[in-house]
Amino acid sequence: MKRLITFVTAMVITAASVISAHAAEIPFESAPENATAEQIYIVQNLVGDILDEVEAGNLGYGLASGYANARIREAVIAGQTNGHGYGELSPISQNAIRNAMDILLRPDVYAQYEAYLKVLIADIISDVANGRDYTEARKEAYTKIYQSVDPSYTPREIGTDWCYVDVPPVDSAMFTVARKLLLQNR
C-alpha cells in the first residue's frame, strides 16, 4: 500500500511539473504537416506559457522564439522529449508563435478570412465532417483558394520544380484558417 501511495504521489508531482496550468494550446492548424500529436503536446507543455505571453501582447516574436528554442534545446539535452529532437520540436513552437503574433496583429483579417472561407470551401468542410480524408480535402481547399485569386490556376504535378510554377499570391493566413476549419470538422 505504501508503494502505491508513493507511486501515485510521484506521478502527480511529475504531471504537475510537466503540465502548465494555464498554458495556451498550440493550434494544430499552425503545426507543420509532419508534426505528430505527441510532438505538439510535448511542445505545448514546454512553451505554452510563452505562447500565453505572445497572445497577451507581452512578448514579441524574437524574444518568444529565443525563449522557446532555449527551453526545447534544454529539454532535448535532458532527455525529456520522449526521443523527439530539436529539429522536430522547434518548428512547431516557431509556427505557433508566428501564428499567434499574426492573429494578434491582424485579428480582423483572420475574422474576414474565416467568414469568407466558410462559404468558399463549405462543400469541402461538409465532406470532411462526413469522413473525407483530411489530406485530400486540404489540397482541394488550397486549390480553391488559389483559384479564388486566379481562376486559371491549376495544381501542378509533384515532380514540378516549384520555382517554375506560377502560383497566385495568397496570404498564408488563408491557408491557416482553411486548415483550422477543416480540422474543426474532422
Image (cartoon, rainbow, N blue to C red):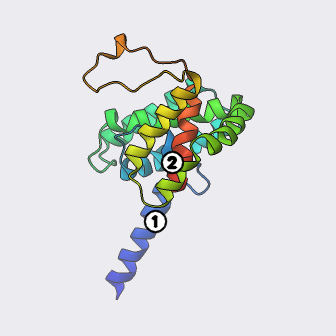
Q: Where is residue 19 in the image (x, y as percent from the top left)?
A: 50, 57
Q: Residues within 10 Å of mark 1 (few under 14, many from 20)?
A: few
The amino acid type found where label 2 is placed reads Ile
At mark 2, the secondary structure is: helix
Label 1, on which residue? 13
> Which of the two residues, 88 or 160, is positioned nearer the viewer here?
160
Asked which quadrant contains residue 62, the reply is top right
> Which of the two residues, 121 or 56, is positioned nearer the viewer here?
121
Residue at x 69% of width, y 33% of height: 104
Depth-wise, is mark 1 or mark 2 nearer the camera? 2
Q: Where is residue 73 in the image (x, y as percent from the top left)?
A: 37, 35
Q: In this view, does 35 lie to the left or right of 146?
A: left
The amino acid type found where label 1 is placed reads Ile
Q: Position of residue 80 (x, y in %)?
A: 34, 49
One can see residue 91 in this view: yes
The quarter of the rendered structure image containing the N terminus is bottom left
Q: Which of marks 1 and 2 is nearer the N terminus?
A: 1
> Which of the two residues, 81 or 174, is positioned nearer the viewer here?
174
Query: Which residue of the protein is positioned furthest toward the right in this rendering?
Result: 108
Vertical relation: 163 (above or below) 84: above
Residue at x 24% of width, y 23% of height: 159
Label ID, residue 69:
none
Label 2, on which residue? 124
Vertical relation: 99 (above or below) 119: above
Contact (Cβ within 8 Å) of mark 1 with mark 2: no
Q: State the separation of the CA atoms marked 1 and 2.
A: 44 Å
One can see residue 57 in this view: no
Q: Is residue 3 left or right of residue 130?
A: left
